[in-house]
Structure formats: C-alpha cells, structure tokens
Amino acid sequence: MSKTILISGASSGFGALSARLLAVVDTEKGQRPFRVHVDPSDDGAEVVFAVGDRIRAEFLRRVGLEDLLHPANWPTARRRTRR
C-alpha cells in the first residue's frame, strides 16, 4: 500500500513565497521586516504566527530583552590574520 501526502495549494505556494521574498528584498535595508509569514493555503496559520510573535515580543519586553526583537547593526567584521 502506498501512502501519498497531498498538500493543498502547493503549486500556488511557490508564487506566494516568491512574491513575498521579492517584496522583502526590494524593501530598503533597515526597513526590512525581521520575520515574514506566507500562508498559501489561507488556513489561518498566518494569524496564529502573528499571535505567537506578539506573545514572544511581550515576553521579551517583560524580561528586559527587547533588543532581541530587532536585528543588530553589526560593524563590519575584521578579518583575523594568522601570524
């Protein structure tokens, strides 16, 4: 007996993913979102992920780690030279 897994909307998922990816890449550096969600099947997962992000952000603010909510501006890394 063979088992087959059917993914609803799989073919449309690639289009939604590529469109979202292009939108993020086209956004000016410093304005890009830290995290994005793509829900091609429109089953409500995007809403659940948004709630999880909000709860996570509230928790990090409560414990004083809100700096983890945004990407850091790291200085250009210096290359180590071997002596």
Image (cartoon, rainbow, N blue to C red):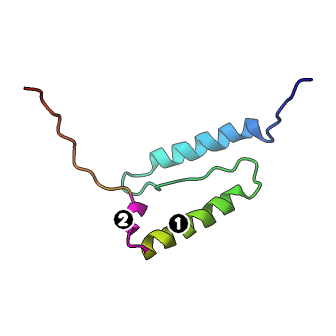
Image spot of residue 27 (x, y percent): 44, 51
Give the label on residue 67, or none: 2
> The N terminus appears in which quarter of the rendering?
top right
Quadrant in the picture for residue 71: bottom left
Amino acid type of the residue that numbered disc 1 sits on in the rendered structure: Arg
- Work out whether mark 1 precedes mark 2 in sequence or the reverse, and give the earlier one: 1
Bounds of the magenta segment: 63-70
Q: Is residue 71 above or below residue 12?
A: below
Q: Please name the residue shown 22% across and 44% down the image.
A: 76
Q: Residues within 10 Å of mark 1 (few under 14, many from 20)?
A: some
Image spot of residue 83 (x, y percent): 7, 26
Q: Are marks 1 and 2 in contact (CB under 8 Å)?
A: no
Q: Secondary structure at mark 2?
A: helix
Q: Is 64 contained in the magenta span?
A: yes
Q: Please name the residue shown 32% across and 56% down the image.
A: 72
Q: Is residue 62 above or below residue 9?
A: below
**Is residue 21 or residue 56 the one in the foreground?**
56
Give the label on residue 56, or none: 1
Quadrant in the picture for residue 16: top right
**Is residue 11 or residue 8 the one in the foreground?**
8
Q: Please name the residue shown 12% across and 29% down the image.
A: 81
Residue at the right extreme of this rendering: 1
Q: Is 27 contained in the magenta span?
A: no
Quadrant in the picture for residue 7: top right
Image spot of residue 20 (x, y percent): 58, 47
Amino acid type of the residue that numbered disc 2 sits on in the rendered structure: Asp
Residue at the left extreme of this rendering: 83
